[in-house]
Amino acid sequence: KINNIFDFIEFILLQLHEELKQEINPVNCETWNELEKKAYEKEIGKEQSLITKIFQGFLKVNNTENNEFILKKFLYLIFELNSEKLGNEISIFDLFNNINNINISNINEDLKNIGDNSCINKKIELFIYPKILILMLKNKNNNIAINVEEKIDLSNLNESINNNYIIIYHLYSVIYEINDNNNKKYIVKCKNEANNLWYLFKDEIITSNNDLKSEVDNNEIPLILFYYRDL
Protein backbone atom coordinates (compact mmCIF):
# COMPACT_ATOMS: atom_id res chain seq x y z
CA LYS A 1 0.00 0.00 0.00
CA ILE A 2 1.39 3.38 -1.04
CA ASN A 3 0.47 6.09 1.47
CA ASN A 4 3.03 8.78 0.70
CA ILE A 5 6.00 9.70 -1.47
CA PHE A 6 8.39 7.68 0.71
CA ASP A 7 6.35 4.53 0.00
CA PHE A 8 6.34 5.39 -3.70
CA ILE A 9 10.14 5.67 -3.94
CA GLU A 10 10.53 2.40 -2.00
CA PHE A 11 8.01 0.67 -4.30
CA ILE A 12 9.85 1.80 -7.45
CA LEU A 13 13.26 0.67 -6.17
CA LEU A 14 12.06 -2.73 -4.95
CA GLN A 15 10.04 -3.46 -8.09
CA LEU A 16 12.98 -2.60 -10.33
CA HIS A 17 15.23 -4.80 -8.18
CA GLU A 18 12.82 -7.74 -8.55
CA GLU A 19 12.74 -7.30 -12.33
CA LEU A 20 16.51 -7.02 -12.70
CA LYS A 21 17.88 -9.33 -10.01
CA GLN A 22 20.25 -12.18 -10.71
CA GLU A 23 22.31 -14.58 -8.62
CA ILE A 24 25.92 -13.57 -8.09
CA ASN A 25 28.69 -14.34 -5.64
CA PRO A 26 29.24 -11.56 -3.07
CA VAL A 27 32.56 -9.73 -3.23
CA ASN A 28 34.55 -9.17 -0.03
CA CYS A 29 36.98 -6.37 0.71
CA GLU A 30 40.53 -7.39 1.60
CA THR A 31 40.62 -5.03 4.59
CA TRP A 32 37.63 -6.67 6.34
CA ASN A 33 38.17 -9.08 9.21
CA GLU A 34 36.59 -12.55 9.21
CA LEU A 35 33.58 -11.50 11.31
CA GLU A 36 32.86 -8.62 8.94
CA LYS A 37 33.13 -10.90 5.89
CA LYS A 38 30.70 -13.42 7.37
CA ALA A 39 28.26 -10.69 8.42
CA TYR A 40 28.41 -9.17 4.93
CA GLU A 41 27.80 -12.49 3.15
CA LYS A 42 24.87 -13.24 5.46
CA GLU A 43 23.26 -9.85 4.95
CA ILE A 44 23.79 -9.33 1.21
CA GLY A 45 22.57 -12.72 0.01
CA LYS A 46 23.22 -13.84 -3.57
CA GLU A 47 20.51 -11.96 -5.47
CA GLN A 48 21.76 -8.62 -6.74
CA SER A 49 20.69 -6.21 -9.46
CA LEU A 50 21.61 -2.94 -11.11
CA ILE A 51 19.53 -1.26 -8.39
CA THR A 52 21.60 -2.76 -5.56
CA LYS A 53 24.85 -1.97 -7.37
CA ILE A 54 23.89 1.70 -7.57
CA PHE A 55 21.82 2.41 -4.46
CA GLN A 56 22.79 -0.24 -1.88
CA GLY A 57 24.96 0.68 1.07
CA PHE A 58 25.66 -0.94 4.43
CA LEU A 59 25.56 0.37 7.96
CA LYS A 60 27.66 -1.25 10.65
CA VAL A 61 25.89 -0.97 13.99
CA ASN A 62 28.16 -1.70 16.96
CA ASN A 63 27.13 -2.47 20.51
CA THR A 64 29.73 -0.56 22.51
CA GLU A 65 29.16 -2.69 25.64
CA ASN A 66 29.99 -6.13 24.26
CA ASN A 67 31.65 -5.42 20.85
CA GLU A 68 28.91 -7.26 18.95
CA PHE A 69 27.73 -5.77 15.67
CA ILE A 70 25.40 -6.30 12.76
CA LEU A 71 25.60 -5.13 9.16
CA LYS A 72 22.40 -3.72 7.74
CA LYS A 73 21.98 -3.14 4.01
CA PHE A 74 19.86 -0.26 2.75
CA LEU A 75 18.72 1.29 -0.52
CA TYR A 76 17.89 4.54 1.27
CA LEU A 77 17.98 5.97 4.78
CA ILE A 78 14.90 7.37 6.53
CA PHE A 79 15.83 9.92 9.20
CA GLU A 80 13.15 10.63 11.82
CA LEU A 81 13.90 14.23 12.81
CA ASN A 82 13.16 15.25 16.41
CA SER A 83 13.63 18.90 17.40
CA GLU A 84 14.07 17.94 21.06
CA LYS A 85 17.26 16.07 20.13
CA LEU A 86 18.43 18.08 17.15
CA GLY A 87 17.27 21.63 17.84
CA ASN A 88 15.35 23.86 15.45
CA GLU A 89 17.94 23.96 12.69
CA ILE A 90 20.31 21.35 11.27
CA SER A 91 22.35 20.61 8.16
CA ILE A 92 22.65 17.30 6.33
CA PHE A 93 26.28 17.02 7.41
CA ASP A 94 25.21 17.50 11.06
CA LEU A 95 22.61 14.76 10.66
CA PHE A 96 25.38 12.29 9.89
CA ASN A 97 27.50 13.62 12.74
CA ASN A 98 24.53 12.93 15.03
CA ILE A 99 23.65 9.62 13.42
CA ASN A 100 23.86 7.73 16.73
CA ASN A 101 21.12 9.94 18.18
CA ILE A 102 18.74 9.76 15.24
CA ASN A 103 16.07 7.16 14.65
CA ILE A 104 16.74 5.61 11.23
CA SER A 105 13.32 4.04 10.91
CA ASN A 106 14.04 1.60 8.07
CA ILE A 107 16.75 -0.18 10.12
CA ASN A 108 15.57 0.46 13.68
CA GLU A 109 13.83 -2.89 14.17
CA ASP A 110 16.95 -4.83 13.23
CA LEU A 111 18.99 -3.11 15.91
CA LYS A 112 17.16 -5.23 18.47
CA ASN A 113 19.18 -8.20 17.24
CA ILE A 114 22.37 -6.88 18.83
CA GLY A 115 22.89 -8.31 22.29
CA ASP A 116 20.27 -8.26 25.03
CA ASN A 117 19.86 -4.51 25.50
CA SER A 118 18.37 -3.59 22.10
CA CYS A 119 21.61 -1.83 21.30
CA ILE A 120 20.94 1.12 23.61
CA ASN A 121 24.65 1.91 23.54
CA LYS A 122 25.07 1.76 19.77
CA LYS A 123 27.62 3.26 17.46
CA ILE A 124 26.77 3.49 13.77
CA GLU A 125 29.26 3.58 10.90
CA LEU A 126 28.80 3.68 7.15
CA PHE A 127 30.43 0.35 6.28
CA ILE A 128 29.85 0.45 2.51
CA TYR A 129 29.12 3.75 0.79
CA PRO A 130 26.52 3.55 -2.02
CA LYS A 131 27.13 5.16 -5.40
CA ILE A 132 23.83 7.01 -5.05
CA LEU A 133 22.77 8.00 -1.53
CA ILE A 134 19.04 8.56 -0.99
CA LEU A 135 18.03 10.37 2.19
CA MET A 136 14.38 10.57 3.25
CA LEU A 137 13.68 13.21 5.91
CA LYS A 138 10.63 12.80 8.13
CA ASN A 139 10.44 16.23 9.72
CA LYS A 140 7.68 15.91 12.32
CA ASN A 141 5.47 19.00 12.32
CA ASN A 142 8.02 20.56 9.95
CA ASN A 143 9.54 22.32 12.95
CA ILE A 144 13.22 21.87 11.99
CA ALA A 145 14.85 24.12 9.42
CA ILE A 146 17.05 21.92 7.21
CA ASN A 147 20.14 23.30 5.53
CA VAL A 148 20.68 21.20 2.41
CA GLU A 149 24.35 21.25 1.39
CA GLU A 150 25.28 20.60 -2.20
CA LYS A 151 28.49 18.83 -1.13
CA ILE A 152 29.10 16.67 1.95
CA ASP A 153 32.20 14.85 3.15
CA LEU A 154 31.28 11.57 4.91
CA SER A 155 34.80 10.17 5.23
CA ASN A 156 34.69 10.21 9.03
CA LEU A 157 31.74 7.81 9.22
CA ASN A 158 33.96 4.75 8.79
CA GLU A 159 36.88 4.43 11.18
CA SER A 160 38.35 1.43 9.37
CA ILE A 161 39.08 3.18 6.06
CA ASN A 162 42.37 4.87 5.25
CA ASN A 163 42.55 8.45 6.52
CA ASN A 164 43.60 9.55 3.04
CA TYR A 165 40.48 8.02 1.47
CA ILE A 166 37.96 10.83 0.95
CA ILE A 167 34.23 10.13 0.54
CA ILE A 168 32.51 13.10 -1.08
CA TYR A 169 28.84 13.22 -2.09
CA HIS A 170 27.31 15.82 -4.42
CA LEU A 171 23.62 16.73 -4.39
CA TYR A 172 21.85 16.37 -7.73
CA SER A 173 18.13 16.28 -6.90
CA VAL A 174 15.70 17.33 -4.15
CA ILE A 175 12.01 16.59 -3.73
CA TYR A 176 10.17 19.25 -1.73
CA GLU A 177 6.74 19.09 -0.13
CA ILE A 178 4.39 22.08 -0.27
CA ASN A 179 1.49 22.44 2.15
CA ASP A 180 -1.05 24.51 0.24
CA ASN A 181 -4.27 24.90 2.25
CA ASN A 182 -3.71 21.45 3.79
CA ASN A 183 -3.22 19.96 0.30
CA LYS A 184 0.16 18.32 -0.14
CA LYS A 185 1.97 18.98 -3.38
CA TYR A 186 5.50 18.21 -4.53
CA ILE A 187 8.11 20.05 -6.56
CA VAL A 188 11.47 18.75 -7.73
CA LYS A 189 14.82 20.42 -8.31
CA CYS A 190 17.43 18.63 -10.43
CA LYS A 191 20.95 19.72 -11.35
CA ASN A 192 22.30 19.51 -14.87
CA GLU A 193 26.03 18.88 -14.52
CA ALA A 194 26.61 19.91 -18.13
CA ASN A 195 25.69 23.57 -17.53
CA ASN A 196 25.73 23.61 -13.70
CA LEU A 197 22.13 24.86 -13.55
CA TRP A 198 19.33 23.77 -11.20
CA TYR A 199 16.01 23.05 -12.91
CA LEU A 200 12.77 23.50 -10.97
CA PHE A 201 9.83 21.27 -11.97
CA LYS A 202 6.59 22.74 -10.61
CA ASP A 203 3.46 21.36 -12.25
CA GLU A 204 3.80 22.22 -15.95
CA ILE A 205 6.32 25.00 -15.29
CA ILE A 206 10.07 24.38 -15.68
CA THR A 207 12.56 27.10 -14.77
CA SER A 208 16.33 27.14 -14.32
CA ASN A 209 18.77 28.97 -12.05
CA ASN A 210 22.35 28.54 -10.86
CA ASP A 211 21.27 28.61 -7.19
CA LEU A 212 19.65 25.63 -5.45
CA LYS A 213 17.82 27.84 -2.96
CA SER A 214 16.32 30.26 -5.47
CA GLU A 215 12.58 30.00 -6.13
CA VAL A 216 12.18 27.81 -3.04
CA ASP A 217 9.97 29.29 -0.30
CA ASN A 218 10.12 28.64 3.43
CA ASN A 219 6.95 26.58 3.25
CA GLU A 220 8.60 24.15 0.82
CA ILE A 221 10.11 21.41 2.95
CA PRO A 222 12.95 19.16 1.64
CA LEU A 223 11.76 15.55 1.87
CA ILE A 224 14.01 13.37 -0.27
CA LEU A 225 17.59 14.11 -1.28
CA PHE A 226 19.66 12.34 -3.93
CA TYR A 227 23.47 12.49 -3.71
CA TYR A 228 26.03 10.89 -6.00
CA ARG A 229 29.49 9.83 -4.78
CA ASP A 230 32.82 10.86 -6.22
CA LEU A 231 34.44 7.71 -7.64
Image (spheres, rainbow, N blue to C red):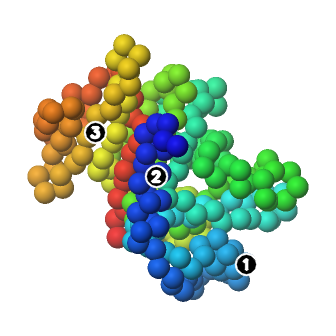
Query: Which badge, 1 or 2, is on the more N-terminal residue?
Result: 2
Residue 172 spot, x, y in % from top left: 29, 50
Asked if residue 75 is positioned above or below residue 50 in the image, the reply reads above
Question: What is the three-letter code of the residue carrying label 1?
Answer: Leu
Q: Residue at x 62, y 41 (%)?
A: 102
Nearest the camera: 73 or 5?
A: 5
Query: Which badge, 3 or 1, is on the more N-terminal residue?
Result: 1
Nearest the camera: 124 or 159?
A: 124
Res 54 quadrant in image: bottom left
> Which residue position holds label 1?
35
Asked if residue 189 is positioned above or below residue 112 in the image, the reply reads above
Residue 47 spot, x, y in % from top left: 53, 76
Q: Marks 2 and 1: in contact by CB < 8 Å? A: no
> Which residue position holds label 3?
188
Q: Which residue is drawn at 60% across and 30% down?
A: 82
Q: Which residue is drawn at 46% across and 74% down?
A: 21
Q: Is 87 placed left or right of 71 in the picture?
A: left
Badge nearest the viewer, 3 or 1: 3
> Which residue position holds label 2?
11
The local crowd at label 3, few if under 14, some if 14 to 19, many if 20 or more residues have their Cα within 10 Å, is some
Res 16 quadrant in image: bottom left
Residue 189 spot, x, y in % from top left: 26, 40
| Quarter containing the C terminus | bottom left
Q: Is mark 3 on a helix, strand or loop?
A: strand
